[in-house]
């Protein structure tokens, strides 16, 4: 009885040892992959930092102006005039007060079931 129990416990210990050993190597493999990914991310961040620095240099007006002057005939660029965006006088003024009578009439028509927009669309057709 005790010999059988010892044999069973020896087999269980052997299986547990094998499982722990396999788990150790699986964890080491995952840790290696994680460190490789972290290294790759670090390299990518360094490259991104360099690209941002290059972009900052390339988009400076002092760098762009000679290029624009050199290719003026091809690009046919002109300076922006403030009038291209419009004037404040072109904007419509706000009404002093909303037309309360028209709004009341609209809400009453909607409550009755009349669709004023639909009626306008039918008139157009």
Image: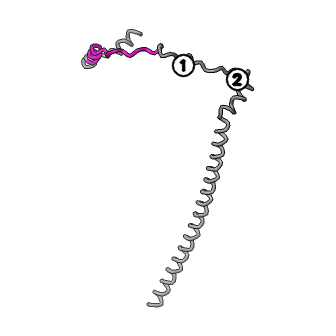
Specify the segment rendered in magenta: 91-107
N-terminal-most mark, 1 or 2: 2
Task: Please give the count of numbered marks on the rendered protein.
Answer: 2
- Residue at 54% of width from left, 77% of height from top? 17
**Tag 1 residue:** 85
**Residues packed near mark 2 inside 10 Å, few (<14), some (14 to 19) or many (20 plus):** few
- Residue 89 is left or right of residue 94, and the answer is right
Q: Percent position (x, y) of residue 39?
A: 63, 57
Which of the labelled discs sits on residue 75, or is there none? Answer: 2
**Residues packed near mark 1 inside 10 Å, few (<14), some (14 to 19) or many (20 plus):** few
Q: Percent position (x, y) of residue 36?
A: 62, 59
Tell whether label 2 touches label 1 (CB within 8 Å).
no
- Badge 2 element: helix
Which of the labelled discs sits on residue 63, or is there none? Answer: none
**Within the image, what quadrant is residue 29 found in?**
bottom right
Q: Percent position (x, y) of residue 108?
A: 25, 17
Please state, as top left, top right, bottom left or bottom right, where the C terminus lies in the image.
top left
- Residue 108 is left or right of residue 95, and the answer is left
- Residue 70 is left or right of residue 103, and the answer is right
């Amino acid at each position: 009885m005790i010999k059988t129990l010892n044999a069973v416990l020896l087999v269980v210990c052997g299986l547990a040892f094998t499982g722990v050993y396999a788990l150790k190597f699986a964890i080491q493999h995952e840790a290696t992959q994680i460190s490789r990914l972290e290294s790759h991310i670090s390299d990518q961040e360094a490259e991104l930092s360099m690209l941002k620095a290059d972009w900052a240099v390339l988009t400076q007006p002092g760098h762009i102006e000679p290029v624009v002057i050199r290719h003026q005939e091809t690009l046919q660029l002109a300076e922006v005039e403030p009038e291209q965006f419009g004037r404040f006088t072109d904007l419509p003024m706000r009404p002093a007060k909303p037309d309360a009578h028209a709004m009341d009439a609209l809400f009453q028509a909607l409550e009755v079931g009349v669709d004023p927009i639909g009626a306008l669309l039918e008139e157009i057709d």
